[in-house]
Structures are given as C-alpha cells and as structure tokens.
Image (cartoon, rainbow, N blue to C red):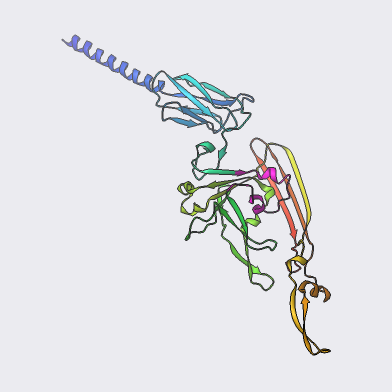
C-alpha cells in the first residue's frame, strides 16, 4: 500500500509539473516583440505605432525602435505598423516571436498628414472630426512681404476673416473664424503656440493723436519668419477637445525647428513705404461763408482743409519708411538640434503722429 501511495503521489506531482510547464509556455507564447526600422537608412524609428489587426491591442516603439505586445492569443497575429512620412506595413508573425524586424519604406507623397489637437496623441487629418485648414507660413514668407501674423492669416484660410480695428501702424485686429458664434463668450479664437496657450484678448494701448486709445494685440509680437505653419480648427466639434472657449475656433501655431546638419544662416532684409493713396480725394471740398468788407456781403468760398494745412507749412501726410531685418541660424546633430532667430522692425505710418 505504501508503494502504491508513493506511486500515486508521484503521478500527481508529475501531472502538476506538466500543467505548470504548459501554463508557462502558454504565457510565453502570447507575446510578440521586435524592432521597427527605416527601409532606407536601417535606423530605428521611435514613436511608430504597432497595432494588432482585429484586436484591441497596440504599442508604440521606444527610442530604440523596439516594441512588445503581450497577452496575444492564437498561433499567428497580423501587425500593422505606421509612422509619419512612411508607408504603413502589415506583417503576419507567429505568436511567441521575440526578434521581429519590420522595415518601413518612405512615403513619396504624404497622404495622411498629422495635425495638432488637444488630445495627447497624434491624430491623422482624415480621422479628425473637425474642419482643419493649414497655412504654410514658411513657404509664404519666402515669396511675399509679410510683416505680421495677421497679414499671414488674412485671406489664406477659408472662413477666417481678419478685421482691422484701426488703420494705425501696430494696431490690433480682430479674428473671426466662421463669423460670430456667441453673444456671451468672446468670439476670438483660442491661440496656441507649440501647444502653449497665449493671451489673444484685445487690450487697450497708449493714447494716439488725442482721439483716444487704440487696441493692440499680442499676436503682433510673433515674427512670421519664425513660423513653420498655422493650423486652424473650425466647427463646434472643436469644443469637445478644448472646451466652450473654443466656440470661436482654435489657431495652432507651430514654429520652426532645427535640422541635423551643418549650421545654416538666413538673412532677410525688407524695405518699403507706408503711404496714403489719393489723399486729396479723401477730403471733400467744404464751403464757408466769409464776410466781404468791400461789398458788405457774405460770400461763399470753397475750403479744402488739406490745402489750407499745406499753405500753413504743416505736413498732413508723409511717406512712412518701413524697415525689417530677420536673422536666423539652425543646425545640430541627431541628438541635439537648435534654431535661433532675431528680428528688428521699424515702421512709421502715413501720418506724422503715427
């Protein structure tokens, strides 16, 4: 009997060991790991998205391009790997593989641009539920004399209107995205610069020409030469991401960044003139009754304010000089990149007091 008991306990122990080993093997077999690289340079791609097709599982590659997926079932799974600027690739791999190597070919045409949104993940443009317009500032400033951010936006995005609050140099403007949308909230859009919100509320500036104060805008502090692109989110659906303050739209400004390579310098010099065209036509001729001592009657004579000021030697309008200097440098290595720029602007209006 004792021998039979020992044999029975031996069979139970062996069976338990087999079950434990099967459990360990099953746990190891439910994992897939590997690396994602560029097909051209063979460099690892950090931030690539690896998704299991047909399952709610995915991962993002680390700085070395490696990924790891656990808890997978079945003998094989289909992985879909995508990365901005590269073509998406699907690969069937065996569950339990730990050295999967997936190479992504570069995409000649970027059909799935990424946009900046209020969510913590990158969103493809076609997958975003809002209307998005993009202004390529870096391309526009190379061919057009743009001196302010508001000039960069005006007329270059559908539904975006820039309203000049004053004709004075440096004055503020109001921005409307698809018109006014609220009687209570501010109709100004939210403005973000590299994911950091800035104050876009119009403020009151110094007094000008004894006619009261003029409105100013902090957007005039942004140099158009330092902007890479501007993305405008339109539609009420933007409030689900940014809140009710985004009922007037969202303007996201992405600045330029350095690229790896030798230092590159860029110098831009612009000169121009601010003037008032056809100034005489803007001042109608008025009439004034003047007593005539010779006849004793009252004569009606024409009076032109502009001509009278000129006769008195006063300058009513002028050609205001405009000078802009922009200097930037960029470069770096694969680990550290830099972009440094500076600007100088001097502008005078068509009026001597402006």
- Point out the image quarter for the C terminus: bottom right
As for residue 154 lying within the magenta part, the answer is yes
Picture quarter with the N terminus: top left
The image position of residue 132, as x and y in percent, is: 55, 43
Where's residue 182, x and y in %?
48, 57
Left or right of residue 216: residue 306: right
On whether residue 132 falls in the magenta region, the answer is: no
The residue nearer to you, when weighing 52 against 177, is 177
Above or below, 184 against 135 in this view is: below
**Residue at the image position 76 percent from the left and 65 percent from the top:** 281
Q: Is residue 174 left or right of residue 53?
A: right
Q: Residue at x 64, y 71 (%)?
A: 212
Q: Quadrant of residue 89?
A: top right
Q: Is residue 166 above or below residue 17?
A: below
The image shows residue 26, relative to residue 210, as above or below, that is: above
Magenta residues span 134-158
Residue found at x 80% / y 72%: 307
On the question of residue 222 being in view, the answer is no
Above/below status of 87 relative to 134: above
* x, y percent for residue 151: 67, 53
Compared across the picture, whether 25 is left or right of 14 comes to right
Task: State which quadrant residue 273 falls in.
Answer: bottom right
Q: Is residue 97 left or right of residue 322?
A: left
- Name the residue nearer the viewer: 349 or 266: 349
């Amino acid at each position: 009997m004792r021998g039979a008991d020992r044999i029975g306990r031996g069979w139970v122990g062996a069976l338990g060991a087999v079950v434990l080993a099967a459990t360990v093997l099953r746990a190891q077999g439910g994992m897939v790991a590997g690396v994602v690289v560029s097909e051209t340079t063979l460099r690892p791609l950090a931030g690539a998205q690896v998704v299991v097709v047909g399952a709610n599982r995915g991962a993002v590659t680390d700085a070395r391009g490696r990924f790891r997926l656990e808890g997978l079932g079945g003998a094989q799974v289909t992985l879909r790997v995508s990365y901005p600027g590269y073509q998406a690739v699907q690969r069937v791999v065996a569950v339990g593989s730990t050295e999967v190597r997936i190479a992504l070919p570069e995409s000649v045409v970027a059909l799935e641009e990424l946009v900046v949104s209020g969510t913590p993940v990158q969103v493809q443009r076609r997958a975003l539920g809002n209307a998005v317009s993009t202004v390529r500032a870096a391309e526009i400033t190379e061919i057009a004399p743009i001196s302010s951010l508001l000039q960069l936006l005006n007329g270059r995005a559908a539904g975006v209107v820039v309203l000049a609050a004053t004709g004075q140099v440096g004055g503020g403007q109001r921005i409307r995205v698809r018109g006014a949308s609220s009687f209570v909230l501010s109709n100004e859009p939210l403005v973000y610069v590299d994911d950091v919100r800035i104050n876009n509320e119009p403020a009151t500036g110094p007094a000008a020409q004894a006619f009261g104060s003029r409105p100013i805008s902090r957007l005039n502090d942004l140099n158009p030469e330092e902007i890479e692109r501007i993305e405008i989110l339109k539609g009420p659906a933007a409030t689900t991401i940014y809140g009710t303050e985004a009922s007037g739209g969202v303007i996201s400004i992405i600045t330029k960044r350095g690229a790896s390579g030798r230092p590159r310098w860029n110098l831009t010099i612009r000169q121009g003139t601010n003037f008032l065209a056809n100034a005489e036509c803007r001042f109608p001729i008025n009439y004034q009754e003047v007593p005539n001592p010779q006849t004793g009657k009252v004569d009606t004579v024409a009076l032109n304010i502009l001509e009278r000021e000129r006769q008195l030697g006063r300058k009513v309008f002028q050609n205001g000089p405009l000078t802009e200097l922009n200097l930037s440098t960029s470069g770096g290595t694969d680990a550290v990149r830099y972009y440094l720029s500076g600007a100088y602007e001097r502008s005078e209006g068509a009026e001597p007091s402006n």
